[in-house]
Image (cartoon, rainbow, N blue to C red):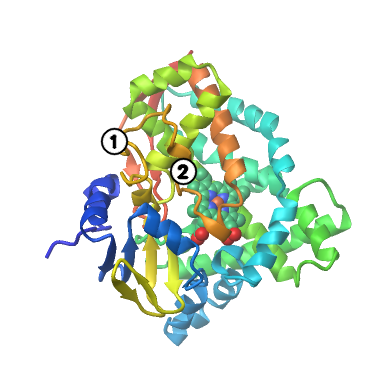
Amino acid sequence: MTALFDARNAAVIADPYPALARLRETDPVHWDARLGGWLLTRYDDIRRSLRDPRLSSDRMRPFFAHLPEKTRDGMADLGAHMALWAVFNDPPDHTRLRGLMNRAFTTSAVAALRPKVATIVDGLVDTLLQEPETDFIARFAYPLPATVIALLIGVPLEDVELLKQWSDDLGSFVLASRLSADKYSRANAAIREMNAYFGDLAEARRRNPTDDVASAMVAAQQRGDFLNRDELVAACVLLLFAGHETTTHLLGNGMLALLRHPAQMQALRAGRGNEEQVSAAVEEMLRWDGPSLAQVRVVAAEYELGGKVMQPGDRVFQMLAAANRDPETFVDPDRFDIARADSNRHLTFGFGIHFCLGAPLARLEGQVAFPILLERLRDIALAAPPDWSDSIVVRGLNGLQIRCIAA
Ligand code: HEM
């Protein structure tokens, strides 16, 4: 029998929405033998399940516990480190770890970045214009969030490339890309190096505090909020990691959505940076084809949904991309419309206690980037078919070749 949702099929990777819609209509709580987990596709089910403590975020400990001993031994650093990420913890540990990041990562610190983000965007647009045809991901959508998060944490800009390599190695493990066989050992090596790097950074900030997030977290640790150095380092790595790849895909998928809907691109350009319009457009990019394909939970205690009973230990894939196109929640959900009023109900930043800590920063980057891009670039066109990543968690482009000229 053909799988209802074949995550390895090239057509599904390029456009998962028809398959997700079929699933939502015919079997909204679906056991997928190949993925080894339940797929939830209805908006209401996913929202409800995200509030239920019977679904646990502690998915790394069981994963490592099930590995053959020999493999596990070679990944000890990775296992120990991942267990300290807020996103992989339930309360009470989650509450403590998130609270600490929250205190350092304040709304005012993010808002204060706006002019700096605009300057970085302008510099990147200059480089885009150096060639008539260019990869929008490599030249713009990747470096913008990487530079911004480095700035915020306090990583020197000359180290951004170094961190990219480590972060990519970690990403091929965390984001479940299926291509690389040696992904575990590369991720483990990357974590060792990142641990050392951020340990040194924390030490430097302890001696000479500045106004960055690393300094604020060190100060929190000194007040006794953090239990230990490893938790501090893990919080830095999580922020760095969570802070760039997803935002890259907001920018990449958003640009592709505009390219595929020229009238909407024109309307956004004509708005000349009207704040309300830009904000609604970014929310619609996040809803219609946002960076979150799925997020994963593990059943902690028997959980019944839609007449199906999930057992402890079962994995659950909450297909956020399917929720965002649920006709029970959104009017005409498959239509990309930057002026729609209901797009900000999307689940792209998750929901509940793990709601994305970096949402204000990601939104700020999108809201600053698109008006500048549209003001400074003309005749933007696709130069090659988009190259989609095969991750089951993240929806994004490996590359997006575009042509454009200066306005
Ligand atoms: C468009 C860009 C982004 C998207 C789509 C996104 C999406 C998400 C989602 C879906 C979650 C929930 C994961 C779960 O419940 O399992 C999450 C959590 C998180 N995000 Fe983001 N994110 C983005 C940008 C950022 C940025 C820029 C940062 C940091 C600077 C960040 C930091 C975090 C952190 C620390 C968590 C964990 C929160 C917790 O567990 O309490 N994210 N994000």
| Quadrant of the image occupied by residue 301 | bottom left
Regarding residue 382, the answer to whether it shows in the image is: no
Question: Residue at left 33%, top 42%?
Answer: 387
Outermost bottom residue:
69
Q: Is residue 370 above or below residue 87?
A: above
Q: Disc 2 residue type?
A: Arg
| Quadrant of the image occupied by residue 317 | bottom left
Q: Secondary structure at mark 1?
A: loop
Residues under numbered marks 1 and 2 in contact, where contact means CB atoms less than 8 Å apart: no
Q: Which mark is residue 143?
A: none
Regarding residue 132, the answer to whether it shows in the image is: yes
Q: Disc 1 residue type?
A: Pro
Question: Residue at left 61%, top 52%?
Answer: 357
Question: Residue at left 40%, top 22%?
Answer: 265
Residue 383 left/right relative to 10:
right
Residue occupied by mark 1: 385
What's the distance in space between the residues labelled 1 and 2, CA to CA? 30 Å
In which quadrant of the rendered image does the N terminus lie?
bottom left
Please name which of the two marks, 1 or 2, marks the residue nearer to the observer.
Answer: 2
Residue 364 spot, x, y in % from top left: 60, 36
10 Å neighbourhood of mark 2: few (<14), some, or many (≥20)? few
Residue occupied by mark 2: 345
Q: Is residue 55 above or below residue 319?
A: below
**Nearest to the observer: residue 340 or residue 168:** 340
Outermost right residue:
207
- Counting residues from the start of the chain, the first of labels 1 and 2 encountered is 2
Q: Secondary structure at mark 2?
A: helix
Residue 221 spot, x, y in % from top left: 80, 64
Q: Is residue 369 above or below residue 393?
A: above
